[in-house]
Image (tube, rainbow, N blue to C red):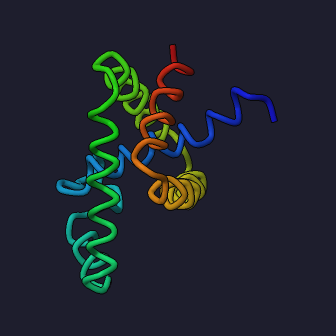
Amino acid sequence: MNKKIKFMIPAFIAVFALMFVFTIPNVMAEGGDHWKKSEWKEKFAKLTPEEREVKFAQFKETKKAFASISDEDRELIKSHFKEMKQEFATLSDEEKDTKRVEFKSKMNEFLVLTLDEKIVHLEEFANSLK
């Protein structure tokens, strides 16, 4: 695996993590998609208080990492998300389900990284988009 791809995978995970972090409070999909705020509440309600605390700490750390990168990098990543959302809308239901499973896996890998590792991955991802 070449160096660029090696860094792109964790950075890709970081981007999806950010997308996840910023959508938790108001998860409402456009076009009647399956994401609903009540579903998120149910998922978090099933967690133990300790698990919930860990998840929220991970989300806060991810948000902090995103805030730590430059404004230019943040805007670049946000625009990349917008493009990805438009592409996602054109996928078949099977492709969407595959993407969701892939995202969940990458998200779980990203959340366990340290704050410094998350910042580095975000910066590398932004640099790969330039």
Q: Say whether residue 42 is left or right of residue 104.
A: left
- The residue closer to the viewer here, 56 or 115, is 115
**Which residue ends up furthest to the right in the rendered image?**
1
Q: Could you say where residue 81 lies in the image, as x and y percent from the top left?
A: 40, 33
Q: Could you say where residue 55 lies in the image, as x and y percent from the top left?
A: 33, 67
The quarter of the picture where residue 7 lies is: top right
Give the residue at x 53% y 27%.
124
Q: Is residue 49 visible?
A: yes
Q: Could you say where residue 94 lies in the image, as x and y percent from the top left?
A: 59, 57
Q: Say whether residue 8 is left or right of residue 93.
A: right
Q: In which quarter of the image is the N terminus?
A: top right
Give the residue at x 69% y 26%.
4
Image height check: is 58 above or below 47? above
Give the residue at x 32% y 36%.
66
Give the residue at x 36% y 44%.
18
Image height check: is 119 above or below 126? below
Q: Could you say where residue 48 lies in the image, as x and y percent from the top left?
A: 30, 86
